[in-house]
Image (tube, grey):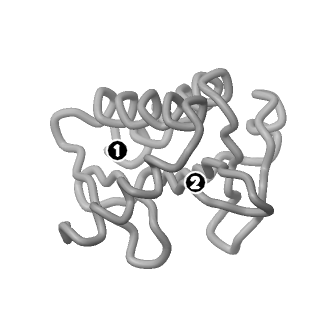
Amino acid sequence: MSDDRLSLFNQRVDKCSPYVQEALVFLRSEAERIGAPNVQLKIAGRGIGIIYFVDGVNVCRFDPKFLDGHEQLWAKLSPSPDAEALKATGLHVRREDKDGPWILINHTRDAKKLAPLIAEAFHLASGH
């Protein structure tokens, strides 16, 4: 992981509100706990985010973003949960891409709703 990219990521996180920072800390700790001992962390190739891999498979990505003057935290899981699973959790899809939805995380309450879906993504990626 490039020190410059990690520094840029950390600078962006430092500009986020305490609510967004707390949600990101929770999500990162969940990804590291669930994916242990095989989890790897990379800075995204495009954008400024972090991606967690297990056994070389992209599992989840967290991107702090600044849009319309507000900081937001977006999350993406792979494989992506279906729309019904997201709707059932009460999470908001910010944008739909060809490889799945970006999920808006406003605070730790949202992050906790996402945690079971992160666990499912790691489970599917590891083949267990």
User: What residue did someone put label 2 on?
Assistant: 76
Q: Quadrant of the N terminus?
A: bottom left
Q: Is residue 39 left or right of residue 74?
A: left
Residue at x 65%, y 25% (from the top left corner) = 113
Instruction: Tell me the element at label 1.
Output: loop
For label 1, the residue is 127
For disc 1, the neighbor class at 10 Å (few under 14, some 14 to 19, many from 20) is few
Vertical comparison of 106 with 2: above or below: above
Task: Identify which amino acid the numbered label 2 is placed on.
Answer: Lys
Q: Is residue 81 above or below residue 32?
A: below
> Residue 98's spot in the image, x, y percent?
69, 74
Labelled pair 2, 1 in contact (Cβ < 8 Å):
no
What is the quadrant of residue 49 in the picture?
bottom left
As rendered, which of 56 and 111 lies closer to the eye?
111
Q: Image quadrant for the C terminus? A: top left
Q: Residue at x 81, y 29 (%)?
A: 90
Please give the name of the residue rendered at 67% of the width and 56% of the height, measured from the top-left corner.
102
Residue 124 visible within the image:
yes
Q: What label sits on residue 115 in the rendered view?
A: none
Q: Amino acid at mark 1?
A: Gly
Front-lying residue, 106 or 96: 106
Category of crowding for the residue at label 2, using alpha-carbon neighbours closer than 10 angstroms: few (below 14), some (14–19), many (at least 20): many
Relative depth, front residue between 56 and 20: 20
Residue at image coords 60%, 24%: 108
How far across and how far down the image is residue 45, in percent?
38, 77
Residue 87: image x %, image y %? 83, 36
Q: Would residue 89 be found to the left or right of residue 16 on screen?
A: right
Identify the mark nearer the N-term, 2 or 1.
2
